[in-house]
Image (cartoon, rainbow, N blue to C red):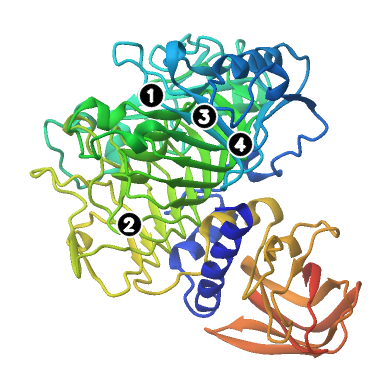
Amino acid sequence: MTRTKRILAFSAYLTGLIPLASAQNVAPSWIDFVDGRAEGRETTLPDYSFAGYHFSERPIPNSSSWTQLHVTDFGAIPDDNLLDIEGIQTALDAAHAVEGPVVLNFPAGRFILGAGELKDHVFEINRSHIVLKGAGDSEGGTELYFHEYRDRELPEKPRLLVRPPDYDRINKDQTLLAECVESVPHGAFSITVKDASKLSVGQDITLFHQSLEAVHKVAEGLTFNPLWNMGKRGIRIYEEHTITAIDGNLVTFKNPVQLHIPEGAGTTQIWPYNPIEEVGIEGIRFSSGWAHYPQDFKHHMNWEVDYAYRGIHLMAVKNSWIQNCTITDWNVGLTLDDALAVTVEDVTFSGKAGHTSGYPRDSYGVLFNRVINETDNWHGIGFRWTTTACVFLDSVMTEDQSVDCHGYHPYSNLIDSVKGGRFTHNGGNQGSYPNGGPHITFWNFEHNASAPSTVYDFWSPEVRKIHNYVKPNFAGLRSPGEEIVFQDVNKGEVGLDELRNQVAYPPSLFRAQLQLRLHGSLITANNAAPGHPASLANDSDPTTKWISDGELINSELILDLGTIQTVSGVKIQEHTGNVDGYQLHAWQDGAWVKIHEGKKIGSDHTADFDPIDTRRVKLTLTRAKRGTLAAIAEFDLITQ
């Protein structure tokens, strides 16, 4: 599937959600979040916006100005029915030797790998500022085909491994750089350490803590099976952070701590974290011989069907990305370990069903955006181990595919505007239970199971239910044609269950929190042309624009200030000159109230009106020449 088709498909799906979510269906948890943010207190919902490449504060870079190498210059020729292992490895070696950023280009065609005397060869990237760039992942694009699987007796490795040189995810560097014995609030950016002399601004670190006290804070009222690790040794915090300031012994991070560490919970340690960064993989189809293996997948039938064909594995990478790729015919498609601020975008999992699609583990802030599961891999989207602040956004699962929280307590993660799948078949051995830790939120999730009704008990220590979560949150859970029953609501075992079978506002929690963090407000629209979302009218950049999708008449933009403020005017930049009439409405006492009506807008339009206290103002375009579009660069409110 091409990137354009993916974007069009998701735009159509989300455009259907926005009108439903923009009226009265405001999630109470959203109001609590924006109010709590203004008041500086902990809120029910964490801030999930610190996810993606550079925490979604900048776009994935255009690498056209980087040094360009081509695998064909090193003997790797597609579509010649010859092995390309040595040619591609020689090209990778040359790319590693380049000073400065480098792109290794692959032309269209099929490259044959994973066969012959070098069938066990693993391609490794061990440097920063490097991109593997293909000619596209659709038919006729670039395909890297790995025919055989690696020998089982060899160390477990994927076909493409991205990591710092000789990085070992099992035996991580636990050198003690600093320690903290004070409480740390959920969402805190700063901690006080005993001695900050080994720390420096700009340094990447790992924050580690494990205690039963931290469990008691988030799992109050829950009882544990004695076999479960969390009830015996506590929940583990393992978070990657970047230091932005040091004032004496007060250390401030770029990204917030995602779990409350209570008073008396013991020591919180700071360890080294030395990732590679600015690594990209673009426009490639990765495929394997699993397509022709004589057995079909059956969960845990044998090693070959579970793990033999392993695709891509990123370890200790920061500010990196995978985009416009297809991962087809693998047992295990994509794994990210110890990652920080990574985007996986416009990626499709397809082909013969296998064990798992893709997941982060022990990672912070991985954003999976527009990820499509076309195949029935046993585990679909999900989180493993102490992964935190990771987000699946605008993604699709198949019917009955499992959301997979895989044990060892992933916490403070978000599944946002995901269509399909169900909550059973989470993974992990019983000692790793519960499958999911605290503060997991399902926002506008559309459940899709073949059964007409499903009963979920999210906390069952007596029976291995394989969907034990610590007080999960749901807002806008929908199940068209199905009945979904939670047994736990009255027992305090579900955190939130808001707006069931409705579309919650805001339509995307991640996007709303990100806009609020970056721009102080949130904007949504009832339509948008592909590549021109409403957020571009709220980014303080006059060169970017929201563009209407189709005729502009009845197009709406809603600007949400988060908290109630006194509004007395509006500023609008509309560069086409096509708008001949508009109305402004303010949200008052559960309804829209008209506060202003105007005619032409133009490139520098200001309108004043009587002051009104409101959170949200709606701009409706009412008149225009037929067949014209609107392009609004900025929509700002004048507040007092």
Q: Amino acid at mark 1?
A: Glu
Distance of label 2 from label 4 (alpha carbons):
34 Å
Residue at which label 1 appears: 148
Is 230 positioned to the left or the right of 102 in the image?
Answer: left
Distance of label 1 from label 4 (alpha carbons):
19 Å
Q: Which mark is residue 421?
A: 2
Q: Which mark is residue 383?
A: none
Comparing marks 3 and 4, which lies closer to the viewer?
4
Q: Amino acid at mark 4?
A: Gly
* Number of other residues with Cα within 10 Å of mark 2, as a class: few under 14, some 14 to 19, many 20 or more: many
Distance of label 3 from label 1 (alpha carbons):
28 Å
Q: Amino acid at mark 2?
A: Gly
* Number of other residues with Cα within 10 Å of mark 1, as a class: few under 14, some 14 to 19, many 20 or more: some
Residue at which label 4 appears: 109
Mark before the other along the chain sequence, 3 or 4: 4
* Vertical position of residue 569 compared to residue 42: above or below: below
Percent position of residue 114, x then y: 45, 21
Comparing marks 1 and 2, which lies closer to the viewer?
1
Seen at 60% across and 86% down, the residue is: 592
Please tell me whether mark 2 sits on a helix, a strand or a loop.
loop
Seen at 35% across and 73% down, the residue is: 501
Seen at 33% across and 57% down, the residue is: 421
Please tell me whether mark 1 sits on a helix, a strand or a loop.
loop
Mark before the other along the chain sequence, 3 or 1: 1
Mark before the other along the chain sequence, 2 or 3: 3
Is 408 positioned to the left or the right of 37 in the image?
Answer: left
Q: Which mark is residue 339?
A: 3
